[in-house]
Image (cartoon, rainbow, N blue to C red):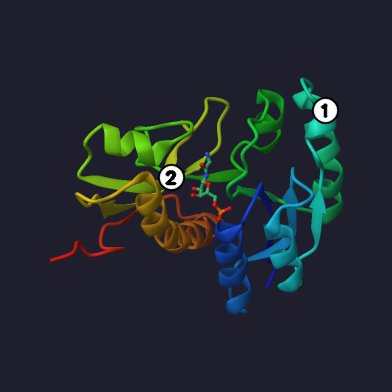
Amino acid sequence: MRKTRVAILISGGGSNMIALVRAMLADPEHPAEPVLVLSNDPRAKGLELAAELGVPTAAVDHRPFKGDRAAFEAEMMAPLRASGAELLCLAGFMRVLTTGFIETWQGRMLNIHPSILPLFTGLHTHARALEAGMAVHGCTVHEVTPELDAGPILGQAVIPVRPEDSPETLAARLLPVEHLLYPAVLRRFVSGDRRKLALLRAEEPAS
Ligand code: GAR
Protein backbone atom coordinates (compact mmCIF):
# COMPACT_ATOMS: atom_id res chain seq x y z
CA MET A 1 0.00 0.00 0.00
CA ARG A 2 1.34 3.44 -0.91
CA LYS A 3 1.25 5.66 2.14
CA THR A 4 1.06 9.45 2.30
CA ARG A 5 4.32 10.82 3.66
CA VAL A 6 3.68 13.11 6.65
CA ALA A 7 6.06 15.61 8.27
CA ILE A 8 5.16 16.97 11.70
CA LEU A 9 6.32 20.43 12.82
CA ILE A 10 6.76 21.03 16.53
CA SER A 11 8.19 23.63 18.90
CA GLY A 12 8.14 21.92 22.27
CA GLY A 13 6.86 18.90 24.11
CA GLY A 14 5.38 17.29 21.07
CA SER A 15 2.59 15.32 22.74
CA ASN A 16 0.29 15.80 19.73
CA MET A 17 3.15 14.72 17.47
CA ILE A 18 3.54 11.54 19.56
CA ALA A 19 -0.19 10.83 19.26
CA LEU A 20 -0.01 11.25 15.47
CA VAL A 21 3.12 9.11 15.11
CA ARG A 22 1.77 6.35 17.37
CA ALA A 23 -1.52 6.24 15.47
CA MET A 24 0.28 5.93 12.13
CA LEU A 25 2.78 3.32 13.34
CA ALA A 26 0.23 1.25 15.27
CA ASP A 27 -1.75 0.19 12.22
CA PRO A 28 -0.07 -1.40 9.20
CA GLU A 29 -3.16 -0.42 7.19
CA HIS A 30 -2.85 3.27 8.10
CA PRO A 31 -2.83 5.33 4.90
CA ALA A 32 -0.06 7.67 6.17
CA GLU A 33 3.45 7.32 7.54
CA PRO A 34 5.60 9.75 9.53
CA VAL A 35 8.75 10.65 7.59
CA LEU A 36 10.07 13.64 9.56
CA VAL A 37 9.63 15.55 12.79
CA LEU A 38 10.96 19.07 12.37
CA SER A 39 11.38 21.65 15.11
CA ASN A 40 12.28 25.34 15.15
CA ASP A 41 13.90 24.69 18.55
CA PRO A 42 16.88 22.31 18.49
CA ARG A 43 16.26 21.58 22.20
CA ALA A 44 12.60 20.65 21.81
CA LYS A 45 11.83 17.63 23.96
CA GLY A 46 9.67 16.27 21.17
CA LEU A 47 12.73 15.69 18.97
CA GLU A 48 14.12 13.11 21.40
CA LEU A 49 10.74 11.43 21.74
CA ALA A 50 10.33 11.22 17.97
CA ALA A 51 13.79 9.70 17.60
CA GLU A 52 12.89 7.12 20.26
CA LEU A 53 9.92 6.16 18.09
CA GLY A 54 12.25 5.75 15.12
CA VAL A 55 11.12 8.84 13.20
CA PRO A 56 13.82 10.94 11.48
CA THR A 57 14.21 14.38 13.05
CA ALA A 58 15.60 17.75 12.03
CA ALA A 59 15.83 21.18 13.63
CA VAL A 60 16.07 24.60 12.05
CA ASP A 61 16.66 27.18 14.77
CA HIS A 62 14.55 30.23 13.93
CA ARG A 63 16.64 32.61 16.06
CA PRO A 64 19.47 33.36 13.60
CA PHE A 65 16.78 34.36 11.06
CA LYS A 66 15.36 37.13 13.24
CA GLY A 67 13.09 39.32 11.13
CA ASP A 68 13.44 37.15 8.03
CA ARG A 69 10.72 34.51 8.15
CA ALA A 70 11.12 33.66 4.48
CA ALA A 71 14.81 32.76 4.96
CA PHE A 72 13.91 30.58 7.97
CA GLU A 73 11.26 28.80 5.94
CA ALA A 74 13.62 28.34 2.98
CA GLU A 75 15.97 26.55 5.39
CA MET A 76 13.08 24.37 6.61
CA MET A 77 12.23 23.41 3.04
CA ALA A 78 15.53 21.51 2.68
CA PRO A 79 14.78 18.71 5.20
CA LEU A 80 11.11 18.76 4.18
CA ARG A 81 12.02 18.15 0.53
CA ALA A 82 14.63 15.56 1.45
CA SER A 83 12.02 13.65 3.49
CA GLY A 84 9.62 13.50 0.57
CA ALA A 85 6.86 14.90 2.79
CA GLU A 86 3.53 15.33 1.02
CA LEU A 87 1.51 16.57 3.98
CA LEU A 88 2.50 18.79 6.93
CA CYS A 89 0.95 18.57 10.36
CA LEU A 90 1.59 21.52 12.64
CA ALA A 91 1.53 20.17 16.19
CA GLY A 92 2.29 22.88 18.70
CA PHE A 93 4.43 24.68 16.11
CA MET A 94 4.56 28.19 17.51
CA ARG A 95 6.00 30.20 14.60
CA VAL A 96 3.81 32.25 12.30
CA LEU A 97 4.34 31.15 8.69
CA THR A 98 4.48 33.44 5.67
CA THR A 99 1.80 33.45 3.02
CA GLY A 100 4.38 32.15 0.55
CA PHE A 101 5.16 29.06 2.64
CA ILE A 102 1.48 28.45 3.35
CA GLU A 103 0.58 28.72 -0.32
CA THR A 104 3.28 26.18 -1.17
CA TRP A 105 1.55 23.70 1.14
CA GLN A 106 -2.04 24.85 0.84
CA GLY A 107 -4.45 21.93 0.92
CA ARG A 108 -1.60 19.84 2.34
CA MET A 109 -1.08 21.42 5.77
CA LEU A 110 -3.11 20.81 8.94
CA ASN A 111 -2.96 22.45 12.37
CA ILE A 112 -4.42 21.77 15.78
CA HIS A 113 -5.53 24.82 17.75
CA PRO A 114 -6.63 24.71 21.41
CA SER A 115 -10.00 26.44 21.08
CA ILE A 116 -13.35 26.04 19.41
CA LEU A 117 -12.53 28.08 16.32
CA PRO A 118 -13.44 30.66 15.17
CA LEU A 119 -13.41 31.63 18.85
CA PHE A 120 -10.06 32.49 20.40
CA THR A 121 -7.61 32.50 17.54
CA GLY A 122 -4.00 33.16 18.51
CA LEU A 123 -2.52 32.71 21.98
CA HIS A 124 -3.77 32.22 25.58
CA THR A 125 -6.87 30.37 24.45
CA HIS A 126 -7.60 28.67 27.78
CA ALA A 127 -7.47 31.90 29.78
CA ARG A 128 -9.60 33.66 27.19
CA ALA A 129 -12.24 30.91 27.20
CA LEU A 130 -12.46 31.24 30.99
CA GLU A 131 -12.61 35.05 30.85
CA ALA A 132 -15.41 34.82 28.30
CA GLY A 133 -17.43 32.66 30.69
CA MET A 134 -17.63 29.70 28.34
CA ALA A 135 -19.43 26.56 29.51
CA VAL A 136 -17.47 24.48 27.00
CA HIS A 137 -13.96 24.64 25.65
CA GLY A 138 -12.29 22.57 22.99
CA CYS A 139 -9.88 22.12 20.16
CA THR A 140 -10.00 22.34 16.40
CA VAL A 141 -8.09 20.68 13.58
CA HIS A 142 -8.17 22.81 10.45
CA GLU A 143 -6.48 23.30 7.15
CA VAL A 144 -3.89 26.05 7.24
CA THR A 145 -4.57 29.09 5.07
CA PRO A 146 -2.82 32.47 5.13
CA GLU A 147 -5.24 33.97 7.69
CA LEU A 148 -4.18 32.83 11.17
CA ASP A 149 -6.30 29.93 12.57
CA ALA A 150 -9.02 30.57 9.99
CA GLY A 151 -8.71 27.71 7.47
CA PRO A 152 -11.49 25.19 6.79
CA ILE A 153 -12.43 23.28 9.94
CA LEU A 154 -11.95 19.51 9.68
CA GLY A 155 -12.82 18.45 13.22
CA GLN A 156 -13.58 19.72 16.70
CA ALA A 157 -13.80 18.24 20.17
CA VAL A 158 -15.32 19.83 23.25
CA ILE A 159 -14.93 19.50 27.00
CA PRO A 160 -16.97 21.11 29.76
CA VAL A 161 -15.53 24.05 31.69
CA ARG A 162 -15.70 23.39 35.42
CA PRO A 163 -16.28 26.13 38.02
CA GLU A 164 -12.89 25.50 39.59
CA ASP A 165 -10.98 25.50 36.29
CA SER A 166 -7.83 27.55 35.77
CA PRO A 167 -6.11 27.99 32.40
CA GLU A 168 -3.72 25.24 33.50
CA THR A 169 -6.37 22.67 34.50
CA LEU A 170 -8.32 23.40 31.34
CA ALA A 171 -5.22 22.93 29.18
CA ALA A 172 -4.36 19.71 31.00
CA ARG A 173 -7.86 18.26 30.45
CA LEU A 174 -7.96 19.36 26.84
CA LEU A 175 -4.61 17.90 25.79
CA PRO A 176 -5.67 14.20 25.92
CA VAL A 177 -8.72 15.16 23.87
CA GLU A 178 -6.45 16.79 21.28
CA HIS A 179 -4.61 13.46 21.14
CA LEU A 180 -7.88 11.76 20.15
CA LEU A 181 -9.02 14.36 17.66
CA TYR A 182 -5.86 15.00 15.64
CA PRO A 183 -5.04 11.40 14.67
CA ALA A 184 -8.69 10.75 13.82
CA VAL A 185 -8.86 13.80 11.56
CA LEU A 186 -5.49 13.03 9.95
CA ARG A 187 -6.64 9.54 9.04
CA ARG A 188 -9.85 10.83 7.48
CA PHE A 189 -8.07 13.62 5.64
CA VAL A 190 -5.49 11.29 4.12
CA SER A 191 -8.30 8.97 3.05
CA GLY A 192 -9.91 11.88 1.20
CA ASP A 193 -12.79 12.25 3.68
CA ARG A 194 -13.46 15.98 4.18
CA ARG A 195 -16.55 15.59 6.37
CA LYS A 196 -16.20 17.48 9.64
CA LEU A 197 -15.52 15.27 12.67
CA ALA A 198 -17.27 16.23 15.92
CA LEU A 199 -16.10 14.59 19.16
CA LEU A 200 -18.77 15.59 21.63
CA ARG A 201 -18.26 12.99 24.31
CA ALA A 202 -14.50 12.94 24.48
CA GLU A 203 -14.87 13.75 28.17
CA GLU A 204 -18.04 13.36 30.24
CA PRO A 205 -18.92 16.21 32.61
CA ALA A 206 -18.41 15.48 36.31
CA SER A 207 -21.74 14.43 37.87
C1 GAR B 1 -1.29 22.04 22.12
O1 GAR B 1 -2.24 22.34 23.11
C2 GAR B 1 -1.69 22.67 20.79
O2 GAR B 1 -3.08 22.66 20.57
C3 GAR B 1 -1.18 24.07 20.98
O3 GAR B 1 0.06 23.93 21.63
C4 GAR B 1 0.04 22.74 22.41
C5 GAR B 1 1.23 21.89 22.02
O4 GAR B 1 1.39 20.80 22.86
N1 GAR B 1 -1.06 24.74 19.74
C6 GAR B 1 -1.21 26.06 19.58
O5 GAR B 1 -1.43 26.80 20.51
C7 GAR B 1 -1.05 26.54 18.16
N2 GAR B 1 -1.44 27.91 18.06
P1 GAR B 1 2.27 19.57 22.39
O6 GAR B 1 3.64 20.13 21.98
O7 GAR B 1 2.39 18.72 23.63
O8 GAR B 1 1.57 18.89 21.27
* Among the 4 quarters of the image, the one containing residue 68: top right
Is 152 placed left or right of 134 in the picture?
right
Is 140 placed left or right of 4 in the picture?
left
Q: Which class describes the residues within 10 Å of circle 1: few (<14), some (14-19), or many (20+)? A: some
Vertical arrangement, residue 115 with respect to residue 24, above or below: above
Mark 2 or mark 1: name the one nearer the start of the chain. Answer: 1
- On whether ligand 1 comes within 8 Å of the CB at mark 2, the answer is yes
How many callouts does the rendering have? Answer: 2
Q: Under tag 2, what secondary structure?
A: loop
Vertical arrangement, residue 66 with respect to residue 60, above or below: above
Residue 46's spot in the image, x, y percent?
68, 59
Residue 121's spot in the image, x, y percent?
43, 31
**Any part of residue 196 in sight:** no
Tag of residue 65: 1
Identify the residue shown where x is 40% and y is 37%.
Answer: 125
Alpha-carbon span between mark 2 and mark 1: 27 Å
Residue type of the residue flagged with mark 1: Phe
Look at the image and tell me in which quarter the N terminus lies.
bottom right
Report which residue position mark 2 lands on: 114
Residue type of the residue flagged with mark 2: Pro
Look at the image and tell me in which quarter the C terminus lies.
bottom left
**Residue furthest left in the image:** 207
Residue 34's spot in the image, x, y percent?
69, 63
Q: Which class describes the residues within 10 Å of circle 2: few (<14), some (14-19), or many (20+)? A: many
Vertical arrangement, residue 188 with respect to residue 61, above or below: below
Tag of residue 175: none
Viewer-nearest residue: 93 or 8:
93
Identify the residue shown where x is 34% and y is 48%.
Answer: 138
**Any part of residue 200 in sight:** yes
